[in-house]
Amino acid sequence: MAAESPSLTVDEPSVHGVSRSRIDIEPRRVGFEYEDVDSPFFYEGNPCISAMWVSLSASFPLGEAEFIKSTRFFEDQITDEKLKEDVKNFVQQEAHHSLQHRQVNKYFDGLGYSTSKLEDFYKQELDKRANKWSHERRLAHTVVVEHVTAVMAHYALTKKERMAGFPESIRSLFQWHAIEEIEHKSVTFDVYQHCVGNRKLLMWAYYYFFYYEFPLNVYLSSRFLLKDMGYKVSWAERKGLWNYLNGEDGLVSSMKPLYRLFRKPGFHPWDHDDSALVADWKQRLSPYFK
């Protein structure tokens, strides 16, 4: 059976202000305990899938800091009061994401991973980028990463069977993160459109990140984590990862229409309206909110 495409609610373009956020961007404080994570291969015993998610978590603290920094380069150019408020709340959300992922990364390290080594590598790469890339290019890159992350967030909130493979604490961590990624999914895009507006640069960033940087980094980072702990991956485990990404309900295959929506002329992140999904999950995860 072929994987079903995600349900799309796409609006036609209309007249908007500078900020086109559709729902409140709500900074929260959360708390998670990870006692139910007793194995480094916490996702259904598969080391490849587990290491992939650990590698993503390892990238978040410095990645979120870069998103904040690349957006703040243009803060003094923003005149729209609503967009200023959006940016403030976006920054608070991203800062807390960094904090929560640093905490879970320490827990992962206690299970045998080396997320701190990965973070050292990410820091070196971001430092090189800061010296070579213009502010506009860095913001364009952030816009694309925010789009891809928002699509993955949609996956985390809609693919119940796939998310069931996580221990409850890890699943809840990623689903809380997903709520907030959807809430603020248009902020950097709106800043870019208001302050830069170069679609050619934006499309370069899309193809560079989605088809090259992201898959290569996830593959190399996951491979490094397992090799560093001395684990030799079997072909069956590799096949499990391939199916997880590209099979029925795969993280890549089932979300392709949403990933590719970015390429549509006149695209805006809220062309796909998943605000009702966020409202539902805010209720489900409210016990974790402080």
Image (tube, helix red, strand yellow):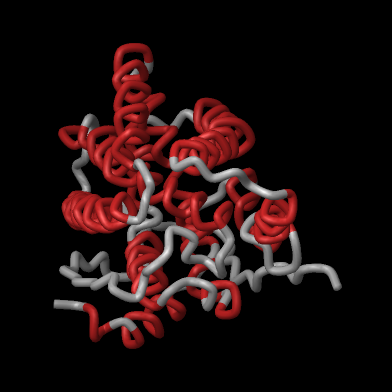
Residue ID at (61%, 33%): 207
* Image-based side of 81 in relation to 177, left or right: left
In percent of width and height, residue 201 lies at 51, 26
Residue ID at (26%, 65%): 25
In percent of width and height, residue 149 lies at 46, 53
Q: Nearer the viewer, residue 244 or 239?
A: 239
268 w.r.t. 135: above or below: below
Q: Nearer the viewer, residue 82 or 86?
A: 86
Q: Count all numbered tags in the image, as a single digit.
A: 0
Q: Which image quarter holds the C terminus?
A: bottom left
Q: Nearer the viewer, residue 78 or 277?
A: 277
* Image-based side of 260 in relation to 283, left or right: right
9 w.r.t. 208: above or below: below
In percent of width and height, residue 161 lies at 60, 79
Q: Can residue 214 be seen in the rendering of this structure?
A: yes
Q: Nearer the viewer, residue 11 or 174?
A: 174
